[in-house]
């Protein structure tokens, strides 16, 4: 009875274009039904068919909340899915078509949040799902892995190409890529500040992947760059001044450190001898 | 020793007589132990007894064949265990455990069964455990009591003996430590015979026993019991890293053991179980759980050196995966240094060194060439040597070829994912080499030399390298080149001072640790005091006699003889 209702709910939920409020109500209904089936969390007594249903509810929930740009809800659904993914395949009636997709989205989500530690911990966990080559060649799982590698190297142009429409493995990835875009731009900006003494306008536009000159000016202003004769000058002089003051302080610190250390050695020597 | 005749020796070894409740007996013994730790002379007597037993066993062993000798070796450990309980000193237990590795080579089910049957009698309180032991090794039919005469007769002689000197007999009871020691031998045997399933079941049985006993003198033994428990679980199908492996199922048992060990201040078990749990989590790649375990537990400070080394290794691995390379480096360096230098632990040193090498590379350092020249390591480290060479030169093509070529080795070592992260380091080193060699180089050349794919990528990568402080340079966008800044003098910075300070600190902490590690036998100072007092008295006496003038050379010699 309850599982039939659940199946109908799931067919409704499977339409990706469902508006968020509607999907939320459907999802909460589905979760109530799961509670009736006592399949909200996996336990050995739950029959495989119910577990499979429960898993799909959470997976769809995760995808829907991502489309609705609700990171908290996405995190919740993914953590609820973890115990399901730990189960052996024979406890489900069918393998999940969405498992790799959800995992890949989660990895990408961690990247956008800058949670590299967790990203790598989870990546290590993927080795239980198959060989490294298998994981990397997977359409979904390979994507965040490649992005991370390029980001670490600094090959931003490749990241950019991979994030363009049509290159992403599915629509949900696009949502996360939108979050990633300004972050990458910030990264590029901070490295350009240090690397170039000055930068012509056009180059800046292509470097930062901005659409128009207006956008460049806005961006330059937001970072406090000086624009003169269609060229951007990075604030090096001001920084140098700040550095010099810092150096003097540092010098003081160094001498203090040396004195402290030497006194420490003397004390220790006394205790030893 | 009254009432003891040589032909009754095996019976005496056979242990406890009388129908006392076991718990009671244990308690009574415990009280005695405590007294013994304070008073020195009785324990000395105890030692002598232990020696006698060991000697008798040895004598017998010489006459018989290898089988007998092994049984004898096993039994000789009981004296050590006895002494450990009496003196409350874990060192003797450890010495007994150390002999396991030599006994191990000769151990067969028959030998073990014989040793058990000679040690236990049907009536002894350990009989239940003994039956469990025999069942585990498939020798249920062996009768307890050593087969020397009928059981009834033995009981008769025992009851007589008990009637004569009951107090003495109590001391000769089979202590639970012996039970557990047999348990460990059984585990070792099952492990060597690859009987994983039986081993796991038997370990569960043994763990229940150990937990019920709750004796501090069992601590180092129970640590070993858990160790084999984990080993058995690892060998059962489905093998890790599958998430259905039995090692997942034994986690609750280990966690419970950890909690109990912490509450009982049982550092041996605590250290050992923490290490096992970490190993367990890492086998199934549950990095975050391992991290949580580390953050929620405190590794005992005075744990055994081997456990510390293992703990540091696993901790280093977790930190390396979490990108905390500096921490990982510290832990792994300590682990490799703490690893025993003998040949038996060469596997551990190799594994730890491999991981250390990768972490060093990830930190941007180039490992010392001498590491690869050690004779015990050379062959095992060869793929890593090639890897280091590629990273050092900054040759991306070479690097990728080596990774592809030795991928299986790296995967087996569990370093593959870490090595994949090295790609960026190779690029960075390449850029650094180029920045050092050329004062000005076009992005196009960088791109060609590092095989970067496109000039655009090269530009971004170089810019990032500049920001990360890898090189000191500037980029010129219009002309498309990288211009290196002049390298500053390292000695003008605070770096040498910091390095110096680090080294001194390491030396000082080494000194502190060595002071802490010094061991003093319990109550030894009292003995010395007593001796000193005696000596002083003797001197005084002598002085008195000299004063009185009735002492000449001969007398003096006679005096000494008498003493």
Image (cartoon, coloured by chain):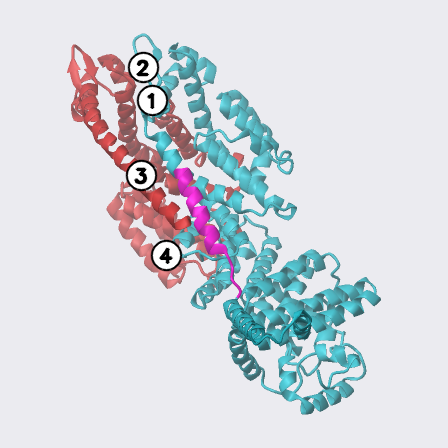
Q: Is residue B136 above or below residue A108?
A: below
> Residue A97, image x and y in percent?
45, 43
Query: Mark 4 = which residue?
Result: A5
Q: Which of pointers 4 and 2 indicates the residue nearer the eye? A: 2
Q: What's the magenta bit mostly, secondary-structure-wise?
A: helix
A263 or A43: which is nearer to us? Answer: A263
Query: Mark 3 = which residue?
Result: A113
Dot placed on the residue nearer the N-terminal end, 1 or 2: 1
**Chain identity of mark 4:** A
Query: Mark 2 = which residue?
Result: B475
> Circles 1 and 2: CB distance less than 8 Å?
yes
Gap between marks 1 and 2 measured at Cα: 9 Å
Dot placed on the residue nearer the N-terminal end, 4 or 3: 4
Gap between marks 4 and 1 measured at Cα: 60 Å
Rendered cyan, the chain in question is B
Question: Chain A appears in which tint?
Answer: red
Q: Is residue A18 above or below residue B401?
A: below
Q: Is residue A167 magenta?
A: no
Q: Which of pointers 3 and 1 indicates the residue nearer the eye? A: 1
Gap between marks 4 and 3 measured at Cα: 37 Å
Neighbor class of circle 4 (other Cα within 10 Å; few <14, some 14-19, many 20+) is few
């Amino acid at each position: 009875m309850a599982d039939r209702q659940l199946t109908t709910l799931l067919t409704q939920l499977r339409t990706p274009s469902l508006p968020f409020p509607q999907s939320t109500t459907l999802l909460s209904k589905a979760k109530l039904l799961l509670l009736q089936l006592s399949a909200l969390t996996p336990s050995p007594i739950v029959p495989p068919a119910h577990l499979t249903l429960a898993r799909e509810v959470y997976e769809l929930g995760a995808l829907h909340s991502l489309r609705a740009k609700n990171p908290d809800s996405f995190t919740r659904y993914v953590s609820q899915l973890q115990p399901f993914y730990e189960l052996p395949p024979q406890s489900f009636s069918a393998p999940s078509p969405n498992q790799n997709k959800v995992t890949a989205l989660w990895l990408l989500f961690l990247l956008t949040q800058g949670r590299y530690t967790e990203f790598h911990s989870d990546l290590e966990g993927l080795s239980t799902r198959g060989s490294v080559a298998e994981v990397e060649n997977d359409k979904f799982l390979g994507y965040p892995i490649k992005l991370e590698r390029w980001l670490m190297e600094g090959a931003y142009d490749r990241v950019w190409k991979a994030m363009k429409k049509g290159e992403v493995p599915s629509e949900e990835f696009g949502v996360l890529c939108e979050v990633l875009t300004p972050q990458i731009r910030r990264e590029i900006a901070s490295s350009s500040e240090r690397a170039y003494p000055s930068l012509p306008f056009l180059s800046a536009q292509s470097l930062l992947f901005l659409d128009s000159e207006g956008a460049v000016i806005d961006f330059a202003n937001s970072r406090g760059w000086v624009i003169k004769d269609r060229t951007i000058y990075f604030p090096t002089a001001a920084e140098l001044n700040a550095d010099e003051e810092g150096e003097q302080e540092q010098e003081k610190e160094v001498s203090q450190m040396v004195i402290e250390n030497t006194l420490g050695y003397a004390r220790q020597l006394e205790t030893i001898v | 020793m009254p009432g003891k005749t040589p032909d009754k020796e095996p019976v005496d070894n056979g242990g406890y007589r009388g129908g006392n409740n076991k718990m009671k007996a244990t308690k009574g013994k415990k009280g005695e132990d405590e007294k013994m730790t304070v008073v020195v002379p009785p324990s000395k007597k105890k030692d002598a007894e232990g020696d006698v037993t060991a000697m008798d066993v040895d004598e017998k062993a010489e006459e018989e064949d290898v089988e007998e000798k092994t049984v004898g070796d096993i039994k000789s450990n009981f004296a050590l265990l006895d002494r450990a309980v009496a003196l409350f000193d874990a060192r003797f237990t450890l010495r007994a455990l150390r002999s396991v590795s030599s006994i191990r080579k000769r151990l067969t089910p028959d030998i073990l069964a014989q040793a058990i049957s000679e040690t236990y009698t049907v009536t002894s309180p350990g009989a239940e455990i003994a039956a469990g032991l025999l069942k585990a090794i498939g020798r249920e039919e062996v009768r307890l009591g050593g087969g020397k005469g009928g059981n009834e007769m033995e009981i008769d002689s025992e009851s007589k003996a008990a009637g004569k000197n009951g107090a003495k007999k109590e001391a000769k009871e089979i202590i639970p430590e012996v039970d557990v020691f047999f348990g460990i031998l059984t585990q070792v045997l099952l492990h060597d015979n690859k009987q994983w399933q039986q081993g796991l079941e038997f370990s569960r049985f043994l763990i229940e026993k150990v937990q019920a006993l709750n004796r501090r003198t069992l601590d180092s033994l129970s640590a070993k019991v858990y160790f084999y428990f984990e080993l058995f679980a690892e060998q059962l199908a489905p093998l890790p890293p599958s998430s259905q492996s039995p090692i997942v199922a034994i986690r609750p048992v280990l966690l419970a053991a950890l909690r109990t060990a912490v509450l009982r201040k049982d550092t041996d078990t605590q250290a050992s179980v923490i290490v096992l749990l970490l190993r367990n989590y890492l086998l199934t790649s549950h990095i975050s759980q391992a991290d949580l375990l580390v953050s929620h537990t405190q590794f005992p400070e005075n744990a055994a050196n081997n456990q510390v080394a293992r703990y540091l290794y696993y901790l280093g691995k977790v930190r390396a995966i979490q990108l905390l390379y500096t921490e990982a480096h510290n832990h792994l360096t300590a682990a490799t240094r703490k690893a025993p230098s003998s040949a038996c632990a060469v596997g551990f040193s190799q594994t730890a060194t491999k991981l250390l090498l990768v972490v060093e590379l990830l930190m941007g350092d180039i490992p010392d060439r001498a590491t690869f020249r050690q004779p015990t390591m050379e062959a095992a480290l060869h793929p890593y040597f090639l890897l280091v060479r590629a990273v050092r030169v900054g040759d991306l093509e070479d690097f990728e070829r080596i990774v592809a070529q030795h991928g299986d080795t790296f995967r087996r070592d569990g370093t593959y994912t870490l090595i994949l992260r090295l790609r960026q380091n190779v690029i960075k080193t390449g850029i650094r080499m180029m920045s050092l060699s050329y004062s000005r180089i076009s992005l196009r050349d960088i791109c060609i030399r590092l095989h970067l794919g496109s000039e655009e990528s090269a530009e971004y990568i170089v810019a990032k390298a500049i920001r990360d402080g890898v090189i000191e340079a500037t980029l010129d966008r219009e002309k498309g080149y990288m211009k290196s800044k002049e390298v500053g003098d390292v000695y003008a910075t605070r770096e040498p001072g910091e390095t110096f300070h680090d080294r001194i600190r390491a030396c000082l902490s080494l000194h502190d640790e060595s002071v802490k590690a010094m061991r003093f036998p319990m109550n030894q100072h009292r003995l010395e005091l007593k001796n000193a007092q005696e000596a002083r008295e003797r001197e005084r006496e002598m002085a008195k006699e000299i004063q009185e003038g009735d002492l000449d050379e001969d007398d003096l010699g006679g005096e000494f003889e008498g003493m």
